[in-house]
Image (cartoon, rainbow, N blue to C red):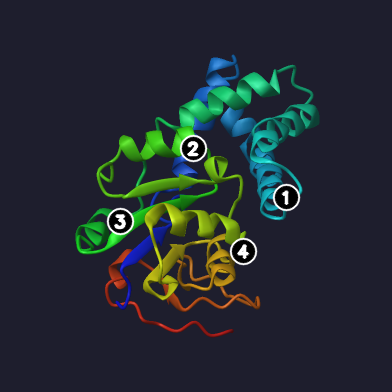
Amino acid sequence: MPYDVLLFDLDDTLFDFEETEKHALGNTFHTFGLPNGLEAYRDTYRAISSVIWDDLEQGRITLEELKVERFRRLFTQHELQVDASHFGELYIENLGHESHMIDGVEEMIAQLADYRKAILTNGFTIAQHARIAGSPLRDTFEAIIASEETGYKKPQPEIFEYTFQKLGITDPSRVLMIGDSLTSDIQGGINAGIDTCWFNPDRRENHSAIQPTYEIHSWAEFSLGRKKVTNN
């Protein structure tokens, strides 16, 4: 690959966020005396969370507001008398205990010893650092850059500018952004003027105007992956 620096998203790129969320949410509900909360409320929560994270990407809400608002809406909808702020704080703490890697990640990373590697995530700083520290990837990354510390978020170009400065990158053409989200990771890389690789294990069709440089469907493809994305 004609790159020196690889920027990886974390959730649903290297780590399985569905598993992470399931365990963290279930444990948090249990602490609040709702042992069946995961089964009863997860579908509603995920629908609310999807909207809220889109609001974050579009700049309509801050990450600190997101932490509480998604649970405030959930508890209001289901008429639950739960402190959304306290619940949100404990949920973030519980996220930090979950390190579920996607199949093939460890093997893929092992083949990239000659590349500089960093994480670029919109997730919560304390949770993302803890999850990586508790995984086999603990000594892998030169930096773990979360939107909380920068004041910006993907797809804003400013978070990439911050990253380039922190890593001493002077030639963006030598940088590749890898992630699962077209609107966050891929659009962010495009906004920053760097090449992108869309990790698309579910083989979702891309009908958007967002065109990654490469597309892969598993981590086994990554070392070979030069597949150009086309609209379907």
Name the kind of residue labelled 2 in the image. Answer: Thr
User: Residue sitting at 53 percent across and 85 percent down?
Assistant: 230
Q: Mark 4: which secondary structure?
A: helix
Q: CA distance from mark 1 to mark 3?
A: 29 Å
Q: CA distance from mark 4 to mark 2?
A: 21 Å
Q: Which residue is mark 2?
A: 125
User: Residue sitting at 64 percent across and 31 percent down?
Assistant: 40
Q: Nearer the viewer, residue 178 or 159?
A: 159
User: Mark 4 packing: few (<14 Cα in 10 Å), some, or many (20+)?
Assistant: some
- Of the numbered discs 2 and 3, the one sitting upstream in the chain is 3
- Of the numbered discs 1 and 3, the one sitting upstream in the chain is 1
Examine the rendered structure and indicate whether residue 101 appears above or below residue 228.
Answer: above
Q: CA distance from mark 2 to mark 3?
A: 21 Å
Q: Nearer the viewer, mark 4 or mark 2?
A: 2
Name the kind of residue labelled 3 in the image. Answer: Val
Q: Nearer the viewer, residue 50 or 61?
A: 61
Query: Is 25 on the left-hand or right-hand side of 101?
Result: right
Residue 105's disc number = 3
Q: CA distance from mark 1 to mark 2?
A: 19 Å
Look at the image and tell me in which quarter the N terminus lies: bottom left
Are discs 4 and 2 less than 8 Å apart at CB?
A: no
- Of the numbered discs 4 and 2, the one sitting upstream in the chain is 2
Q: Which residue is mark 4?
A: 183
Name the kind of residue labelled 4 in the image. Answer: Thr
Q: Which residue is mark 1?
A: 55
Examine the image and state in which quarter residue 86 appears: top right
